[in-house]
Amino acid sequence: MRKWKGIVKTKLIGKRKLETREMSTSLRTTRGSEQRRLQCLQDIQKLQEEIKLLQISNEKLNGVGLDDMSFTELASLGSMLDEGFRIVDEQLDNVVGVFFVFSNSSWFDYSSFEYDLMGGPDWTQRIEKEDLAYQSLLAGRRVALRNKAREFRLSPPETQPWRSDDPERLVKTIDSLEMEKERLRLFNQRMLGKELDGMSYSELFVFSFEISGAIMKVVSMKKIKRDEEMGKTKRPRPSVNVRFIRSVFF
């Protein structure tokens, strides 16, 4: 009987130890998951703040949201855009020059049969028109995305869609935000005439058009700011009471 009680007691102790070990493992797992979730939320918040700054810069570089800028700030922005336009315009000339050299090379003569087979100049013009139409479509999408992002940023705080307890979903959100951050960074650089390597003629042409449009908006806002400053410095002329003057002197 005592032996049987000892066996039962040993089994109970072993069961309690196993349950304690499993509970400890579960707590560590839960604690680790919570730490990962909190880290993901911190990373998301940091990325959103960085993206917000890039969005504001992107808007300014495209001539949007200039009201809060001073005349000096507008002049500086205009200078940067002018330089960006100059560089993009030079790159356009370089692309045309490369095509001219290519078309007069021996390799082009060797492949002229394939070129003629595809349709010759008509085929080239068709491809260029299709590429230009596609790049114009992308430019329109950039405008739509910029307007939507600005509308969301200026709207009252709402429940963020990325609030989740699932670490995998949070990681996917982080990946999406990283891509958006890089997209904005690249477009901002290209508006300043940087990181243009690999861009086609149509891409460069559309970007030059976007930059020139932004320059015109900056110039227009500079004029408004200048007129406002001149209006502040001008002292209003005192009103003249003609009837009083006549009564005194005549």
Image: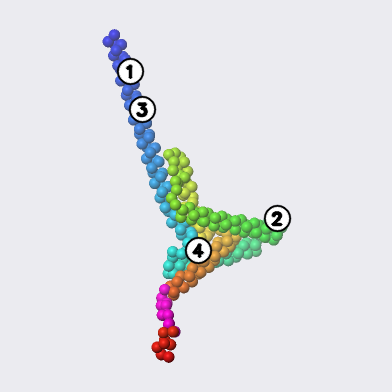
- Mark 2 to mark 3: distance in Å? 71 Å
The quadrant of the picture occupied by the N terminus is top left
Cα–Cα span, label 1 and label 4: 77 Å
**Which portion, as a residue range, is magenta?**
232-242
Q: Name the residue under label 2.
A: 118
Is 231 above or below relative to 61?
below
> The disc labelled 1 sits on which kind of residue?
Lys
- Pointers 2 and 3 in contact (CB under 8 A)? no
Secondary structure type for disc 4: loop
Rounded to the nearest angstrom, the CA distance separating label 2 from label 4 is 42 Å
Relative depth, front residue between 228 and 94: 228
Figure check: 16 above or below 113: above
Give the number of the mark in front: 2 or 4: 4
- Which of discs 2 and 3 lies nearer the camera? The answer is 3
The secondary structure making up most of the magenta span is loop
Mark number, residue 22: 3
The disc, 1 or 2, on the residue closer to the chain's N-terminal end is 1
Residue 11 is tagged as 1
Q: Percent x, y for residue 98?
A: 59, 63
Q: Is residue 238 magenta?
A: yes
- Amino acid carrying mark 4 in the image: Gly
